[in-house]
Image (cartoon, grey):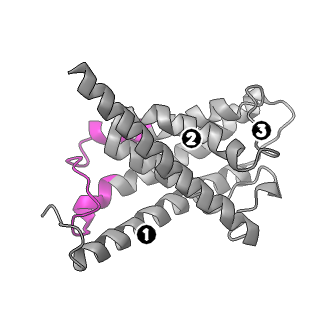
Amino acid sequence: MQKLDLVHFLKVSITVYFFYMVLWGTWYALHIIDIANMRVDNGWTGSLVFLPHGARVLMFCFFRYHSLPALYLADITGPSLLNHEPYDINFIDGSNVASIGCLLSIIVSVELLRWTRISDDKLSLLKPISFTNYKFLFLVIVLSSLLSGVISNSIIVILNDQLTIDVLTILRFMIGDFLGAVTVVVLLWIIFSTLIDKRMIISPD
């Protein structure tokens, strides 16, 4: 039984890590043409379409706590692997701790919605789209974006006295996480819906 659990954990970790890295790589490539202030050299202002937040939300919603180690690892290694200069891993400036804050925002959002029984918690991108099927995911995106903007920036400020963050910066982080996650979900839904229409995959319904 333990062997099966370990195999499952490894499969989840690999899937989560590479999914996150694909979205991070896509977001990082788009910064070159500066869409929605995606440039990493614009300072601590926040992108208005932060795609990696979609990976955080989706992977935790589908795989729950098994996804957290891989998400954290991708969060702290992805930027450094793709562009070592501005994203050098630094355990002093608080960026790694802020990543924990981002993940915590999703955990709190999911558990809060489960506690309020707002959804049956059965999520699938293969189901026909409806408010009933997707309200849980949408609400997690909204709540986690709000919490992530506040928590992550608060951690950075607490651990780095040289950095000042205003309300506008926090708002940009909230909007960026929200739009980024929504963009990822919509794109995945279009892809899966097209594959179902072409009968390349079978809908669970």
Res 34 quadrant in image: bottom right
Q: Which mark is residue 63?
A: none
- Name the residue located 39 percent from the left edge and 65 percent from the top edge: 188
- Name the residue located 73 percent from the left edge and 26 percent from the top edge: 91
Residue 129 colored magenta? Answer: yes
Instruction: Mark 3: give few (<14), some (14-19) or many (20+) Cα within 10 Å.
Output: few
In the depicted view, which residue is nearer to us: 72 or 154?
72
Residue furthest bottom as drawn: 198
Q: Label 2's element?
A: helix
Amino acid type at image mark 1: Leu
188 lies left or right of 180: left
Q: To which residue does mark 1 refer?
A: 187
Amino acid type at image mark 2: Ala
Quadrant including the C terminus: bottom left
Discs 3/1, front: 3
Residue 173 x %, y %? 64, 52
Residue 107 x %, y %? 42, 36
Q: To which residue does mark 3 refer?
A: 88
Amino acid type at image mark 3: Asp
Q: Which residues are magenta?
A: 107-136
194 lies left or right of 92: left
